[in-house]
Image: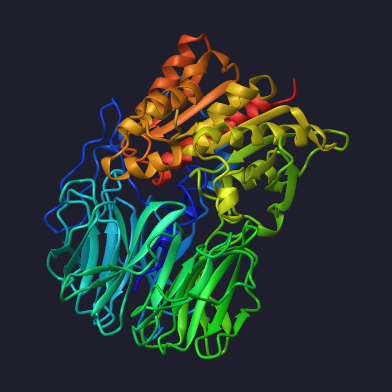
Amino acid sequence: MTSTRHRLTALLLATTIAGCGATCPPSTHTTATTAAEEPAPQAEPSAGGEPAPSADTSAMVVLDGTPEIPPALHARLQQYLETRAATAESIAADGSSLLVTTRFADTAQVHQVRAPLGDRHQLTFGEEPVRAAAFYPNDENAVLYQADVGGSENYQLYRLDRRTGRSTLLTDGTHRHPGFLFSHDGARLAYTSNARNERDIDVWVGDGRTPGELLVERTGDWHLLDWSRDGARILLLEYVSITDSRIHLLDVATREVRRISPEGVTAADRAAVFDASGQRAYIASDRGSEFVELYEVDLASPASEWRPLSRAIPWNVEDVVLSADGRTLVFSTNEDGISVLRTMDARTRRITAIEGTPRGVVASLVAARNAPMVAVSMGTATTPVDAYVLDLRRRRLERWTESEIGGLDASAFVEPSLIHYTSFDGREIPAFYYRARGVAEGTRAPVVVYIHGGPEAQSRPWFIPIVQFLASEAGIAVLVPNVRGSDGYGKGYLALDDGLHREDSVRDIGSLLDWIAQQPELDASRAAVYGGSYGGYMVLASLVHFGDRLRAGVDIVGIANFVTFLENTAAYRRDLRRVEYGDESNAEMRTFLAQISPISRVERIQSALFVAHGANDPRVPASEAEQIVRAVRASGHDVWYMLARNEGHGFLRKENRDVFTELAVMFLEQHLAAH
């Protein structure tokens, strides 16, 4: 078993945004090629198997048009830059210890924690960030972990022998291996790979000690969900789009793959686990309603009626795991952005919420193999993601890590309020509102609109250091909307920005600016937009449409031109993105995509602009940043530009993230200052 981040639910949680840094929620993992800018060298794995160090980092960050960072600003931000988080990656079979990823130096590494709030004992010491890890079920002296080089997202799997401290490379060192899953007895390791043709994701199986072998070839994007307890079958998920994903059953011995999701029904099947017998499955799907519900399915006759289990909860089920004894299902629901942790008795099907759960977001769930315990990663708007353990016998959630926040007083952070504003068509749009502190009486606060990526992601109340600094220290209010097309509010809402309706989500930002103008404590004449990935497109599009109402925009790894983005993103994700945005190879759609691309209307961008990107970005090539920077400068306007040669889709290295955060704060304070 493995954590939520290796399941589809986690693929939808969040896009890596540079500003949240070490306290980001677990991010999604996808890839693309680099841009025309020469990428950072991609080093081969070292002889010992660990990810090889990247090129010399002394020249890794290229700054173009940015001013010097004042020492005083660094001093103001320093404590916020030292915040960190801890994600529960794996729990020991008997529940006695956890593997967590957290950062003590420049990148996140694997640590073991042996008791609640115990010491974090570091196990890996690479220069590259570790993205996932797991205990070997049958070998307490071995750990499996996953890492890439330079933000390429071509993830490799490594076996760490804790007796020698040496790592062995289990994959080919070149291609992408995004997911892994141990059999219940630990004898076999399944993982996914695009090694065959760099486009399609196949399933491989090995013993976890030596490189595996191709088990089944697949066409498209496939994910491992769960392995039956007898080791005979694996649940797979075929991902076509945010609204179309299907569960399949793989027979490991015969290599037969059989579809479980009914033919002729388009639905998002997002998570699934076997029951203890392996004859039935619990599946999270939106096939029967607006929201993702929990169903019980007979795998012998999956075409028969799927039994709904959570219909009384009108919100999305995020993820689900089964307890070691098979008696208790643990799952979380996303209720207007807030997670509610619940259990279901597998016999009576009675669902109960876990009391005392922090008001925040559950990032991952992973069950112990032989003990009634589940590791939970969760965070709140004022506390970073940390590791907890849910004891199912006592129904108690106990905190196992307490990540540092740079010595800051958490009680001084701003708790956001959930507001709803009316958009152009009368639709209510949700947003989290961080009110500015320290604003003089009678003075209106400037505003930053922080826009999520995806587009099928969802802004939720995570702890984001730059947001807390702006609201708590800089006197700048922050509004974090979930415009139409965001996940979490039903499949109808999710589809509202599809295809020719793409710019309706941009119009939602215009309506938010209208709402800001109506608030007596906010200064609508001092507003900026900030976003990453698709949120970067939204920043540029907002500057195109509402430039007279916006002073500045911060575009992080954003899309400037939908046509070139789709042409240059990695082969294995191109079709996935075409489903959302449209197929650029179709002449009519190509014309539309070109028309709505910010690069086509760059002369309308009059506001100040800061663009930041990673040279190795596998999702949005850095050429998207380069072309918008060139075009805006050619139109006669200045642009701040930051390129990190050893990063991909966002900034995972602390040294790079610090530079970005300092520049972003300086940029926003400079352009939102009262005139």
Q: Nearer the viewer, residue 564 or 525?
A: 564
**Residue 504 higher or lower than 99, as above or below:** above
Task: Give the residue displayed 44% in from the left and 20% down from the top.
Answer: 629
Q: Nearer the viewer, residue 122 or 593?
A: 593
Task: Give the residue displayed 37% in from the left and 67% down from the top.
Answer: 111
Residue 72 in the image: state x and y as whole percent: 59, 34
Q: Quadrant of the N terminus?
A: bottom left
> In the image, is 72 to the left or to the right of 418?
left
Residue 66 seen in the figure: no
Residue 185 in the image: state x and y as whole percent: 25, 83
> In the image, is 619 to the left or to the right of 470?
left
**Residue 438 higher or lower than 672, as above or below:** below
Residue 510 in the image: state x and y as whole percent: 68, 31
Q: Nearer the viewer, residue 569 or 87?
A: 569
Q: Quadrant of the C terminus?
A: top right
> In the image, is 77 to the left or to the right of 155?
right
Colour scheme in the image?
rainbow
**Residue 58 higher or lower than 137, as above or below:** above
Task: Give the residue displayed 50% in from the left and 86% down from the top.
Answer: 346
**Image quadrant where residue 470 sits:** top right
Residue 512 seen in the figure: yes
